[in-house]
Amino acid sequence: MSKFFADSLRKIRTESGLSQQALADEVFVTRSTVARWEAGTRLPDALMISKVSDVLGADVNELLSAAAQSDECPNVIMVDDRKLILTGGLPILEEVMPDATVAGFTDVPEAIEYAKSNRVALAFLDIELRSTSGLDLCRTLLEINSRTNVVYLTAFSDYAFDAWSTGASGFMLKPITAEGVRKQLNNLRYPFWTGGEDA
């Protein structure tokens, strides 16, 4: 988890004069939840971070940035059954997220096995895969790790409604661009440190 966020939250809370219990009461969680945030063993999602920043009178961007600075090298995957899409997309992901480990898969079972042995922070998924639907793959990845951010990739905008119902963080029309990826990173449910120019 993020020690950066834990240290930042503890410092801001202490400076504001609130106890862990008082903060917990204001954002409707238990004191032990706040204690876990400050110990770095749990990380709240972006919505909760926004609530905490309001209560503490803190800059929400400061806390989101601290949450994004993970102590681990994030794993990012891209799954598309067309090699050409991976060939073009993977270098863009590496450019935007230089501190991430980026891997591409045309085979869905291989992607699932990778996710089981590597904590995936972000997955870019084609919606129309040969062997399965990207929507089903999203559900599988979230069963493996509920904090995996998923961004769908497709050439067809009419999939957007179905995509949102799966718990995804975003939706991108192909072809993938650096600007489009940066925009998606700003909307992740569970932010992480990317090492990019906007980090």
Image: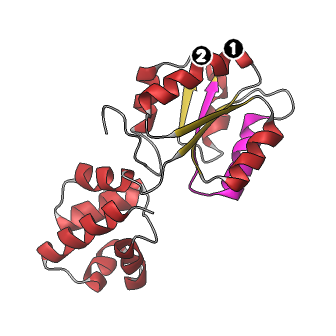
Quadrant position of the C terminus in the picture: top left
Whole-percent x and y of residue 180? 45, 23
- Apparent side of residue 72 relative to residue 167 in the rendered image (left or right): left
Residue 97 image point, x, y percent: 44, 34
Q: What stretch is highlighted in magenta?
A: 133-153
Q: In the drawing, what numbered circle is on residue 88?
A: 2
Q: Nearer the viewer, residue 71 or 67?
A: 71
Where residue 3 sits, quadrant-wise, is: bottom left
- Disc 1 target residue: 84
Residue drawn at x 51%, y 28% as measured from the top left: 93
Q: In the figure, 89 relative to 99: above or below? A: above
Name the residue: 76% across, 26% down: 128
In three-dimensional space, the C-alpha distance between marks 2 and 1, rounded to whole angstroms, equals 6 Å
Secondary element under disc 1, as helix, strand or loop, is helix
Label 1: how many Cα within 10 Å (few below 14, some 14–19, many 20+): few
Q: Is residue 116 above or below residue 178?
A: below
Residue at 46%, 44% (x, y): give it: 188
- Say which residue appears at 61% left-offset and 58% top-offset: 146
Residue 91, magenta (yes or no): no
Give the x, y percent position of residue 22.
26, 82
Question: Please, is residue 114 above or below residue 27 in the view?
Answer: above
